[in-house]
Image (tube, rainbow, N blue to C red):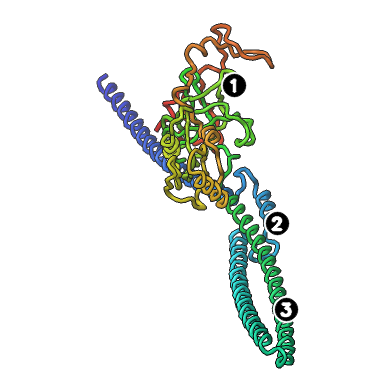
Amino acid sequence: MAASENQGMQIALILFVILTLILSVTTFFGFQSYKTSEQKAAEYQRQSQEASTANQKTIRENSELKQMMGVAEAESIDNVKKQFDADMAAWAATVPNDSKTYRQSLELMFKALDDRSKNWDAETIKVAELTQRLAEAEKKKTEQVAVHEKTASDAQTDLAKERAGFTDDRKRLEDQLTSNQADLEKIRNDLARAAAEAASELKKLTSQLDESRKIADNFREERNQLLDPTFEVADGEIVWINQGSGTVWINIGRDDSLKRKTSFSVYTSEANDLADPEPKGKIEVTQILGQHLAEARILEDSLSDPLLIGDLIFTPTWTPGRSERFALAGFMDLNEDGLSDRSAVRNLIQQAGGIIDFDLDDEGKTTGEMTQQTRFLVIGDQKSNLQGYSDAVKRAKELGLEVLRLPEFLDHVGFKDPKRVLRFGITPYAEFKGDRKDGEPRSATGTNVSKRFEPRKPRQKRNTAYDLNTRPNSGTPDSGRK
């Protein structure tokens, strides 16, 4: 009985050892397989990240090249080629085919303009020489006339004293005088002919100068088209909104060089040209939350046309990644109190990262200088120093600057006088009923609030203009901060 029990225990022990070995071997091979799979997954993830970075770099470079060529980012390469061919046919028809590029075409046009300028200088010298010759001829004529008049006077005096004896001499002198008058008439004809030739040459030079100015104007216009963005391009858009707190979130941020207190005008998403329609509201940046995400407060809104997701934003004082350059002239009064608010205008520009190249202040004192890098001239009222004001506007037009009157500038930057801001979102929104029939105005008839005015959650899918790394995963704006 005891031997049977020992034998059973031995068998059980042997089975236990065998199971333990099998489990150990299985665990070892399973761990090796898991470690290999994990390494492969990490390698695939690294390769995917490198490919994504290279793809984003290629897209960004293509976008920058299109901006430098003056075409929209959405344009296809076929449309870009068509635009290039049209530009070459219009402006570079005489340029050799192997030199038909924007840069070489501009260099050839500049050389042609320089050659015409040198020709103008040479012709100017010729006109000066002809003028000098004319003056010398006039001087010689005057001297000859004086000599002949003196000779005639002497002859008449002698003739009065000895009339009888000098009859022949008198005739001789009269003949000489006639000859001198003929010579004088010939000189006058020569001078008139020289003056006519000089006038014809001057007319020709004037025509050449006008042509050169037209070429320079075309060159300046092409330069502006290549280097300057236009008002027709929006700076960004509203990605979500909370009307109750008067807060919106926009798809531009830290990587776009956006700064706090930058103001924007808001336009409907259907607007095709931001230079023409009236803005529907105004906002001011309060926080930079991410690479392409920022929070802003509503400065101005309308119950009948509230701010919505997808609305476009624009300001001339700021361009992504670049500082705009401004010039100021005239008396600037923001709130119509008769006092100068020039410092407030300067702060609006500088807070948005803009640079002030030139300023003609209220006392007529000039600071800085307008250059071809300056983009806008903001003008106020003419209250003093009218000549300086006119000179500033004329200089801006010569450089091709965009001239904005103060109200237009304030509309574009989204400025709102803090003393006049009407804050929405407390009582009026609680009593506003948004549902209505087409063509009927909205009216506050109770406590039923349209879903249009409830706090908005961010959309889950965005286009490439919205940074996926900063997109929140929840409905709260704080989840998008970094």
Dot placed on the residue nearer the N-terminal end, 3 or 2: 2
Q: With respect to residue 222, does 470 lie above or below?
A: above
Disc 1 element: loop
Query: Tag 1: residue type?
Result: Asp
Query: Tag 2: residue type?
Result: Ala
**Left or right: residue 339 compared with residue 268:** left
Q: With respect to residue 357, does 425 lie above or below?
A: above
Q: With respect to residue 402, does 189 lie above or below?
A: below
Quarter of the image that includes the C terminus: top left
Q: Using the image as rendered, state which of residue 22 and residue 37 is in the foreground.
A: 37
Q: In the rendered structure, find residue 185 and report the number of the disc placed on it.
A: 3
Which quadrant of the figure has residue 4?
top left
Residue 9 position in % (x across, y down)? 29, 24
Which of label 1 and label 3 is nearer to you?
3
Task: Report the residue marked by disc 1.
Answer: 305
Q: CA distance from mark 2 to mark 1?
A: 44 Å
